[in-house]
Image (tube, rainbow, N blue to C red):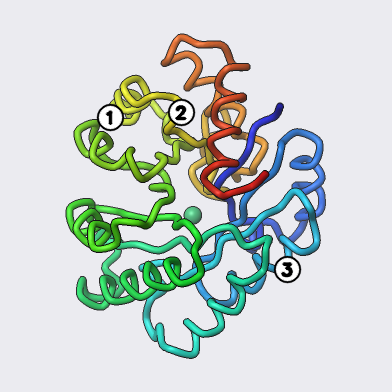
Amino acid sequence: MRLVDTHCHLDNEQFNLDREDVIERIKDKLEFCVNIGYDLKSSEETLKLAQKYDFVYGVIGVHPTDITGYDESIENRLEELAKDPKIVAIGEIGLDYHWMTEPKDVQKDGFRKQLALAKRVKKPVVIHTRDAMEDTIEVLNEFPDIEGVIHCYPGSIETAKQLVDRFYLGIGGTLTFKNAKKTVAVVKDIPLDRIVIETDCPYLTPEPFRGKRNEPIYVEYVAQKIAEIKGVTLEEVVKVTTENAKKLYGIV
Ligand SMILES: [Zn+2]
């Protein structure tokens, strides 16, 4: 069994010059990867990639910093895209109070509408939350039957314990940074069967490549760090997190 990148952005322009090579390396090294949309255009691109490569799955939705202008026509198109069997979740959706592109109530409205969409199409969700954990949990609690992943989990152990019944925690390159104390503590405490590995590439490149462009095969460095923190073998991390990724996205 091999690793999975549960959260990547292969449609990003940083891959324009060598996308085929990056995808070839995924095919060689990983079980599969999941490309994540952040607006309607990238969601359309995500479906194209997922239809082209059998080891690429897709997630479609509108990110909180791109929620400006979210309306019924966008939502109807997302609902159509979501019907494709290679589209395995709705995301990335959530709240971002760091960039504050739109006021809180506008972000919450777009978040609620897409959670309702996920419920209608019976798919899990990929959550983005930044400086907004309390409100994110409050909105998620309005949808008690929704499950999914909190991508690049930024919270405390206490918050993680409230979330892990329903949500996997997505752990990425930031775990390898020197200032990752909080995330290291979360990884130590939360059982491996609630953790999935991601890159969020081209962003958040792990050590030893921090500062360069990230790509899906670098999940290896995150997996190694998790093994080290939990005191288990790399093989164990690969086996459990890949099973988790399959369960999360309903991939058999
Ligand atoms: Zn992302």
Could you say which is closer to the camera, residue 213 or residue 127? Answer: 127
Q: How many C-alpha atoms fall within 10 Å of the one at disc 3: few (<14), some, or many (≥20)?
A: some
Task: Give how far apart the Cα atoms at labels 1 and 3 are.
Answer: 37 Å
Mark number for residue 192?
Answer: none
Counting the numbered discs, the total is: 3
- 44 vs 145, left or right, is right
Q: Nearer the viewer, mark 1 or mark 3?
A: 3
Mark number for residue 182?
Answer: 1
Q: Position of residue 45 (x, y in %)?
A: 67, 70
- Amino acid beneath label 2: Asp
Could you say which is closer to the camera, residue 189 or residue 182? Answer: 189
Name the residue beneath numbered marker 2.
193
Could you say which is closer to the camera, residue 218 or residue 127? Answer: 127
Looking at the image, is mark 1 or mark 2 earlier in the sequence? 1
- Amino acid beneath label 1: Lys
Q: Position of residue 15 (x, y in %)?
A: 69, 56
Q: Nearer the viewer, mark 1 or mark 2?
A: 2
Q: Position of residue 103 (x, y in %)?
A: 22, 75
Q: Secondary structure at mark 2?
A: helix
Residue positioned 73% across, 62% down in the render: 49
Q: Position of residue 208 (x, y in %)?
A: 56, 27
